[in-house]
Every structure is written in C-alpha cells, then in structure tokens.
Image (tube, helix red, strand yellow):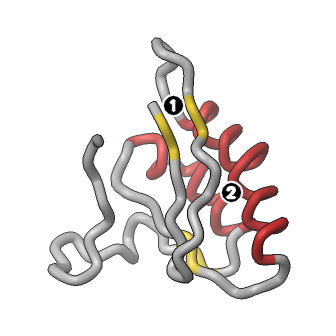
Amino acid sequence: MVWAGVMSDGKKSPLIFVPEGVKINKEVYLSMLNDQVLPWIKAEYGETFFTFQQDSALAHGSKLVQEWCKQNFPAFWNKFTWPPSSPDLNVMDFSM
C-alpha cells in the first residue's frame, strides 16, 4: 500500500510505502501519521492553518485515530463532517 498527501497548493507529500502483507489497522495508520505525516506537514507548512481530511478506510474512522487527528490537526474533518455524496468534494477513494 502507498500513502500520499496532495495539498491544495499543489505540493505532494513524500510517498509512504507499507510493506506487502502488513494490514493497515488503526495502530499502523496512527504510527504513519505520527512518525511521517505530521513531521512532514510541520516542516513544510510550519504554523500555517490547514484542513486535514481522510477517506472512509476503516482505520481512519477508529476512535483512536479520530481523537489523535482532532488533537494534532488544526481543522480536522472527522468522519461525520464529510458529506456522503458531494459531487464537488469527494475524496479520491480508490486504488491506482
């Protein structure tokens, strides 16, 4: 699996590769956020205000991950904020 972030200003995060056979559960995903995603965002954007949003993967919706995101991202769109069928704002929820 590969994780990537695409920002509204056109910047792209470094790709995060998850080894084959590793199941992305809430602990693995939280480790990625804490150890790789958040440090990159802080290095790239400093104290700039941003919104963090995810797709509907099971690990993204866990209470643990939702709470961590709420505490670490200034404007976090939780799983209840995201509109279920917005024609304009749907997250890319597919594999490439």
Label number found at residue 68: 2
Quarter where residue 32 is shown: top right
Label number found at residue 25: 1
The x and y percentages for residue 52 are: 56, 71
The x and y percentages for residue 86 are: 19, 79
Q: Give the structural element (helix, strand or loop) at label 2.
A: helix
Judge from the rendering whether residue 56 lies leftward or rightward of residue 34; answer left or right. Answer: left
Q: Residue furthest bottom?
A: 49
Judge from the rendering whether residue 43 lies leftward or rightward of residue 70; answer left or right. Answer: right
Q: Give the structural element (helix, strand or loop) at label 1.
A: loop
Q: Quadrant of the C terminus?
A: top left
Q: Amino acid at mark 1?
A: Asn
As rendered, which of 44 and 63 lies closer to the eye?
A: 44
Vertical position of residue 12 compared to residue 45: above or below: above
Q: Amino acid at mark 2?
A: Trp
The x and y percentages for residue 10 are: 52, 76
